Amino acid sequence: MSKNIICFGEVLWDKYPDKIQIGGAPFNVFSRLHSFRNNVKLISAVGNDSLGLDILKYFKKNNFETDLIYQDKGHKTGCVNINLDSGEPSYEIVSNVAWDFIPFENKKIDCIKSIDFLVFGSLASRKNKSFQTLKKIFNYSKFKILDLNLRQNFFTKEKLELLLIASDFLKINMNEFKIIIKLFDFSGSNNEDLLKKIYNKFKMKYLCLTNGSFKSYFFDGNSIYQFKPVKVNSIDNVGAGDNFLASFINEFFIKNNKTENSLKIASAYGALTTTKIGANPIIKFDEVKKLLKI
């Protein structure tokens, strides 16, 4: 029996200086999980404007279900202005957009009354409407996966603490790791020590710290796994972490692959994402096998 996966949060348009592409961290995770033929849906909102209609057209073209995508007549579809410097993105995220106001509609409850895995970020909690909806959805979720995405000033300690306490699995990058350490006054002699303290404070089951081209960590409460990135020629790092997470969820939680193998395959998907333009490129498993030499 397939697992019921829900991704919650922003779907939007990434606006590069010379192009526009669909994105948003929860959407990126959703899209990659869908490519693995998982039973996955996205809860989000778009505006009743041309950009919102374009997102709905994109969903239908790619056989994505739209029943949990709300059309907000009062707010515009979300956009992010992106500039790349040697492949590394900088973001300007437009505020007060449709995905800031995702409603909790009781008529949709049959679709989400039993969620095996809920994947969500912190960005969609910046406004109270979507934050309150997310907290209600927590009640229907067996396992919660938090992909921290601390952007600009769109977070508070109070909201982060609630999200961290709720999560069973936290995925975090090095910049976010440093912010959490400072925000919650953690101290430790090394990254492994600090990881364990975060894990214990928020009573998690798994914690993953990714670190770009450097050594990364995964902690399951007993063992800390260190894994190195797969070397590629990167041109666009947007969405790399999202594709890593989706691939890890698919390998580790859905296929019950071993931890080391799951991390290796997920790292390959994340790395291959950076070799292509956009956060949701087509990646064939043959590319993964070739990269990993398996």
Image (cartoon, rainbow, N blue to C red):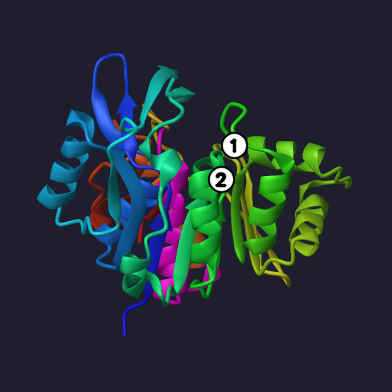
Image spot of residue 174 (x, y percent):
65, 39
Question: Does 96 appear above or below 144?
Answer: above
Image spot of residue 60 (x, y percent):
13, 51
Judged from the image, the secondary structure of the residue bearing numbered disc 2 is loop
Asked whether 101 or 230 is in front, the reply is: 101
The CA span between labels 2 and 1 is 7 Å
**Quarter of the image holding residue 33?**
bottom left
Q: Give neighbour class at mark 2: few <14, some 14-19, many 20+ (Cα, 10 Å).
A: many
Q: Residue furthest left?
A: 61
Q: Any magenta on residue 250?
A: yes
Going by the numbered disc 1, the residue's amino acid type is: Leu
Going by the numbered disc 2, the residue's amino acid type is: Ser
Work out which quarter of the rendered image holds the C terminus and state it.
bottom left
Question: Does 80 appear above or below 65?
Answer: above
Which residue, given by chain and number where applicable, does mark 1 sit on?
150
Note whether residue 265 is visible. no
Which residue, given by chain and number where applicable, does mark 2 sit on?
122
Q: Which residues are magenta?
A: 238-260
- Name which residue lies at 24% across and 66% down: 37
244 on left or right of 160: left
| Mark sitting earlier along the chain (2/1) | 2
Q: Are marks 2 and 1 in contact (CB under 8 Å)?
A: yes
- Name which residue lies at 69% across and 42% down: 177
